[in-house]
Image: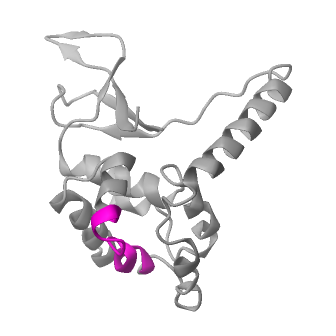
Amino acid sequence: KDVIKCYARPNFGRWTLPLQKVDYPETIDKYKWFARFLLEGEVFLKFNQIKKHLNAAPGLITRTWNIKKVNILVNALFNKSIDSKKKLKEEWEKNEKFLFNEIQEWLHHDHQDELNNIWPPSFGDEELVKKHQKKLQKKKRKQSSKPKKPKKDIVVKSISGFDSDDSDLEVEYLI
């Protein structure tokens, strides 16, 4: 795990094949998705503590490009080929302040100091993950008796590496 996966509906000639779960293609968009998942608290749970203080929705990263703070964050990840939790932790072992300024740009000015309280987010995250998994298991047990609602999927059109006209792509980060 610790990889960005997507569900692609590839085409073979004129035939549309069933959904295939594949690694996200090696494009700049892969780093955009990782940046989005990072800010949404999917990669490190500690980011959930600052999520409410973001000055823009992380979804902005995958919807647009020419915004300074999006470019700065995505380029920092792209330039070091960081597209996973493991790679980011390795970088933080070398440079503890990597991404600090880039992420601080995403916080409201009056909450930028709060980033210091959780930095670097990887320290102590294993305990948070265990607690989170226990909560999810408990929640699953409660919900197993309730009728299931359809899950909202993120769909991106025309990803390179797939026949582009009608290819749908659902993206997820697997911890």
Q: Residue at x 32, y 69 (%)?
A: 70
Residue at x-position 66% and y-position 42%: 130
The answer to whether 65 is drawn above or below residue 5 in the figure is below
Q: Where residue 89 sits: x, y (%)?
A: 37, 55
- 173 sits to left or right of 12: right
Question: Looking at the image, what colour scheme do you see?
Answer: one colour
Where residue 69 sits, quadrant-wise, is bottom left
Residue 113 appears in which quarter of the rendering?
A: bottom right
Say which of 156 and 35 sits in front.
Answer: 35
Residue 5 is left or right of residue 133, and the answer is left
The segment highlighted magenta reads: 92-104
On screen, residue 76 above or below 164: below
Q: Quadrant of residue 105?
A: bottom left
* Chief secondary structure of the magenta portion: helix
Tell me the quarter of the image containing the N terminus: top left
Please state the horizontal and vertical placement of residue 98, each as a whole percent of the image: 32, 71
- Seen as rendered, the residue at the extreme front is 93
* Left or right of 73, for residue 80: left
Tell me if residue 94 comes above or below residue 13 in the rendering: below
Q: Outermost residue, bottom direction?
A: 110
In front of the other: 123 or 175: 123
Q: Position of residue 102 (x, y in %)?
A: 35, 75
Q: Is residue 95 magenta?
A: yes
Q: Position of residue 18 (x, y in %)?
A: 35, 11
Q: Is residue 99 magenta?
A: yes
How many marks the image carries: the answer is 0
Q: Residue at x 48, y 38 (%)?
A: 175
Between residue 24 and residue 80, name the one nearer to us: 80
Q: Is residue 43 left or right of residue 86?
A: right
Residue at 52%, 49% in the rendered image:
42
